[in-house]
Every structure is written in structure tokens, then in C-alpha cells.
Image (tube, rainbow, N blue to C red):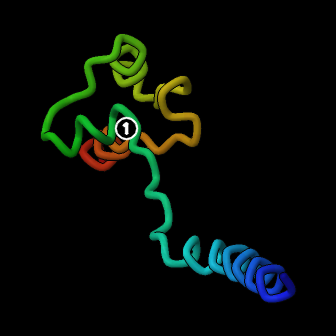
């Protein structure tokens, strides 16, 4: 009976220690692309109404690009200079 308890404790301890080790081996989550970045990667322009209106004004769509990572907006600024 003592042997079963010891083996159970050892198995549970190993299971608890193995969790973080396995999690560390996973690759980090990739950054999710915005609609404009996906369109740029495909060689197209973003077709969302809000993005098209913002691009006409030379701005970045705040709804789709909350961190202003709009690639096409940056390209238009570089083209105009």
C-alpha cells in the first residue's frame, strides 16, 4: 500500500513539472495580421469600406488598425514624398 502511494505522488509530481516544460517548448504565438496587412501580402488593396474611406483621407482605419499598423498608409506617404 505504501508503494502505491509513493508511486502516485511521484507520478503527480512529474505531471505537474512536465506541464511548464512542455509549454516552454511551444513556439510563441504569431502576431495576428490586420485586414490591410493581409491584402498587402496578397498584392491587393484592402476592400473594407472603413479602410477605403480612411485611405482616401490619407489616414489609417482606427477600427481595423488600432495600433496604426496600416501598411498601405505608410506606402502612400512614402510615394508622396
* Residue drawn at the location 40% of the way across and 28% of the way down: 58
Extreme residue toward the top, this view: 49
Q: x, y (%) of residue 34?
A: 40, 37
Q: x, y (%) of residue 59?
A: 46, 29
The residue nearer to you, when weighing 8 against 61, is: 8
From this view, report whether residue 53 is shown above or below residue 80: above
Q: x, y (%) of residue 55?
A: 36, 24
Residue at mark 1: 73
* Residue drawn at the location 21% of the way across and 29% of the way down: 45
How packed is label 1: few (under 14 Cα within 10 Å), some, or many (20 or more)? many
The residue nearer to you, when weighing 16 against 33, is: 16
The quadrant the N terminus occupies is bottom right
From this view, report whether residue 49 is shown above or below residue 81: above
User: In the rendered view, does 40 fall on the left or right side of 4?
Assistant: left
User: In the rendered view, does 55 fall on the left or right side of 44?
Assistant: right
* Residue drawn at the location 23% of the way across and 41% of the way down: 40
Q: x, y (%) of residue 70?
A: 41, 40
* Residue drawn at the location 55% of the way across and 75% of the way down: 22
User: In the rendered view, does 41 fall on the left or right side of 54?
Assistant: left
Residue 3: quadrant of the picture: bottom right
Amino acid at each position: 500500500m505504501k508503494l502505491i502511494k509513493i508511486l502516485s505522488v511521484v507520478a503527480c509530481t512529474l505531471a505537474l513539472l512536465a506541464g511548464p516544460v512542455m509549454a516552454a517548448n511551444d513556439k510563441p504565438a504569431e502576431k495576428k495580421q490586420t485586414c490591410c496587412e493581409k491584402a498587402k501580402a496578397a498584392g491587393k488593396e484592402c476592400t473594407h469600406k472603413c479602410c477605403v474611406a480612411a485611405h482616401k483621407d490619407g489616414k489609417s482605419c482606427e477600427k481595423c488598425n488600432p495600433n496604426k499598423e496600416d501598411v498601405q498608409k505608410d506606402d502612400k506617404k512614402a510615394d508622396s514624398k
